[in-house]
Structures are given as C-alpha cells and as structure tokens.
Amino acid sequence: MTLVAGVDIGSTTAKCALIEDGKVVGRSLNPVGVELVKDAERALALALSDSGRERRDVRAVTGTGYGRFKVTFGQFTVTEIGCHAKGAHFLFPATRVVLDIGGQDTKAIKVDANGVVIDFAMNDKCAAGTGRFLDVCAGALGYDVSEIGPLSLGARRPVKVTNTCTVFAESEVSSYVARGKDPKDILAGLYGSIVSRSLSLLQRVGVEPEVTFTGGVSRNEGMVRTLRARLGLPVNVSPLSQFVGAIGAALYGLERLEAVPA
Amino acid sequence: MITCGLDLGAGSTKGVLLEDGRRIVATALAPTRGHAVDAGRTVLELLAEEANLFPGDIEYLCTTGGARYAFPDRHLQVSDITASARGAVFLRPGVRHVVDIGSQSSRAMSVSETGRVLRFKMNEKCAAGAGRFVDRCAKYLQVPLDEMAPKALASTKPKIISSVCAVLAETEIINNVAEDVPLPDILMGVFLSLAQRAYVLMRNVGIQPDVALVGGLVRSEAMVRALERTVGAPIVADPQAPHAAAIGAAVLGHSRLQKLSQRPTPLAAAEV
C-alpha cells in the first residue's frame, strides 16, 4: 500500500502519474509555462485530486524530464531515458525498444528483459522529427496539432517533404497548400518525414520486437499507423503513452524506497 | 554597353545595371514572396526607371540566386557563389574572404584577387545561421526588423543562445523574455548566434583578410559588430554589399558579352 508519484516536466507539457500496488491510480497532464516549479506542483496537485488522495499519502515524488530539477519538492530525480524504459516495461513487459517522441526531442531506447536501458540514440539538437516539427507544420496547414491525428487517414498520394529543417519544411507545407494539395496528402507526407527521422534513430540502437511508442506524438493516430507500416512490425501504444515517463519515475521512486527501508 | 545582373533570391530579388563593366548606374530590390519571375520583372522595371532607360536598352542579362534558371529572359546564369564572390571583389578589391548570409542559406568563400572562388562552404540544409532566423525573431519579439540592430547595439551583456536549431532557439528566447533578460541583450544574442554559425563555415574555408560580409544582413550594424566580435577581425561592410551577387552577375555578364563580341558565336545560356 505504498503510493508513489512521478512528475515528468517536458518541454511542452507536465505529466504526473500516481502508482499504488502496481496500478496507475491518478494522473494529470497540463501545458508548461515558464514557471516550471509551479507547473510541477500543479501536476502533482491535479493527479492527487484525480485519484482522491492527499499529499501526505505520497511516500516519494520522483522528477524526470528536461525540467526534472524544477521538481524541487521531490526526493529523487532520474533522466527521462531510464524512466521511459522502465515505464514502457511496466505497461508492455516484452518491450525491447522504446521510441519516445516528445515536444523537443526524439529518443530510441533499447532495453533488456527487466526494462533496464542497454543503449539509446537521441536527437535533441534540432526540431526535425520532434513534436515541435509537427506543431509548426500543423500551424502552416491551419490546424492545431491536437486535431491532426486522424486527418491523414485516407490519404492517397502523400507528398514528399524534402526539407529536414522545420523552418524550411513549414515553407514547403505552405507552398503545397498554395498549390492546392489535399491536406490529407500533406499530413501523410509530414508523418512520413518524422517516421524517417525516427527510423534512423531506431536503426542506431537496433530494432527488435516488441517496439513501444511513447511521448506526446504517440497520441497521433496517423503517426502510429505510419510508424507501423514503415517498420513492418506491430507497435505498442498504451492509452497512457503520454505518461510513460511519469510512470517510470514513480516506479523508480518505489524501488528506491524499497532499497532503503525507512 | 549596359549589362544587368539579377539575383533571384529566396527572400528578395536584387538587380543592378552596370555600364561598360565598370560603373553601377542603378540598383533595385523587391521582395520575392515565392514568385521569383514576377519579382525579377518588377526589379527590371525599377532599374530601367532609375537609370532612365528602356528595358530594351539592356544588352545582356545574367541571372543568379536560387531561381536563376526560372527567369526566362536571361542570356546567362551563374551560381550565387561565383556571383557574390565576384561582386564583393568588384566593390572592394582587397577582399579575399566573403561571407554571404542569405535568407535561406549562407556561404563562405575564399577568393582570388580577380574575384574567382578558391574554396567555399555552404549551409542550405537548415535555417540556423540563415537570415530567416532574424525575421522570425523580429516577428515573435515584436520588434520591427529595422529596429532590431539599433536596439541590439545597446546591449551590455548579450544573452548567448545555446540551441543551434532555429526553432528550438525560439523557445529559448521566449524563456529569456520570461526571465526578464533585457531586450537588447536578447537581440544581440540573436546576431551573435548567426555570427557563430557563419564562423563555422568561414573557419572551414580558411579566413584571410580582408573579410567582407555580403547579403541583406550587411545593412544591420549589429550583425557586422557581432561578426567582428566572433571572428576577431574587422569586417568590410560596403553599402552596396546587399547587391553583391547581382553586381557579380552583371560583371560576369559583361565579360561574357565582350568575349562574344570578339568571337561571334550564337548566344548560349551556359553556366559559368
């Protein structure tokens, strides 16, 4: 009966997951602003009210994500790579490769049978192939990134997005719009471009089933379908795929508590 | 003898008229806005008007820039690297290294005393280090483009941008605004960041004085200062340097025309 919390402060959203007895009992998701400490506090408070529990019931809070050091009220911090590995293993125990596409970076993580990281490859230098790329290009199409998921379904002739750079791809999308291309085909082209970037990271760590897709971009149905098709493998996507980092962090805190009996 | 150089760039289209290969008699500029041919025609009209000529008085037209093949009424086209090197040396004969920051690409070249390109490096894959980055910063910082430089020059502690990517740099700049970093320091950070990207290309080619900056950003004093600070050497910033590639195209057009008049052959559009 140990309640633990994981708080994942990403570049775009703050996630919190509460775990008790091997189950996710509460969660929250909200956009981050510039005051990350407050965003982290709010993430925990919202997850507590989601689960109907009190702050004093929480035995450990673990921070992860690029803003993990802003989880100033937590006991532990862990990198998001370890957390995504652990969280993916918790949801899909046969996971061997995790693809995490977040707001500002993309990671391919190879894990062992216990969910421990063996190897990883990441792009955090450039917005190409990240959620940000999708965000900017959706904007050029006149959509919010949250609504484009199903819109590429039924695309017949995906366009080829030739530019890697997000800024240039945005112009390319605008020129396709100006030429009257079907938004479905443009979106399918964008998903193809992101998946190509992801595949090169995945190949660096070595693709092995099962593959689990995590992070905000995994909520996008078109992306999931494109990844499955290009990989030629089934891809696990949990309804909690955006919380995988937070879940991993909570589990990490639990392990630490068990290792050091109070 | 009037030759015209037309630089059909991604951001703007520049043109010059050159008399006898020596004297610039007109310069003009129009935003490209995705329609290179229209912008080129507009620039030709502006040039003719400024020089008080009919467009038909232009004896030879040489295009350069990304859309150089798209313009139909040309006699010749030359690459933008060849053209801006030649233009920079035409403007300032002592120049041996040219850095050209365009809207979508940037390049560094070492050049001979006749303005021939000896070595060059180019970045056209990514917006980091291209002029577009400054436009975007101006937009989201809500500072008009022409006010950026004077404001940046007031900076005392420039805020260096750590992201290389133009998109991720935006997030970083927005965070700086939220953390109350003074606007001049943020703006100077933008120019220093561009200068650093240019410096990577420049070092690759090898830097030799005199170093000239050409392309639209040369109008921005903050850009010139940022580059001087990064390179650690004075930078030649000619007032006509935004037109360097168009000037180079006109010069190359003139020498081609002279060769043709010595040895009569049919006018062939060929890459120099």
Image (spheres, coloured by chain):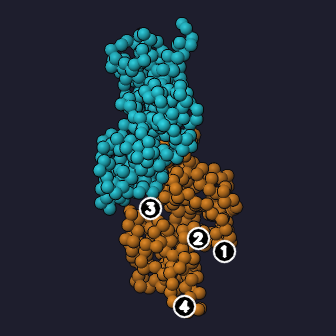
Chain colours: A cyan, B orange
Measure how far apart labels 2 and 4 are at the Cα level.
Answer: 24 Å
The mark nearer the N terminus, 1 or 4, is 1
Residue B11 is labelled as: 3
Measure how far apart labels 1 and 3 are at the Cα level.
Answer: 28 Å
In the picture, measured across the screen, residue B12 lies left or right of residue A52, that is right
Residue that badge 4 annotates: B265
Q: Amino acid at mark 3?
A: Gly
Describe the element under mark 3 as helix, strand or loop: loop
Residue that badge 2 annotates: B82
**Residue B90 x/y as whole percent:** 60, 73
Asked if labels 1 and 3 share a chain, the reply is yes
Is residue A255 in view from this perspective? yes
Q: Nearer the viewer, residue B175 or A185?
A: A185
Foreground tag (3 vs 4): 4
Residue that badge 1 annotates: B114
Asked if labels 1 and 2 share a chain, the reply is yes
Question: Callout 2: residue from which chain?
Answer: B
Foreground tag (1 vs 4): 4
| In the image, residue B61 above or below residue A241 | below
In the picture, measured across the screen, residue A92 lies left or right of residue A141, that is right
The mark nearer the N terminus, 2 or 4, is 2
| Residue B113, quarter of picture | bottom right
Question: Callout 1: residue from which chain?
Answer: B
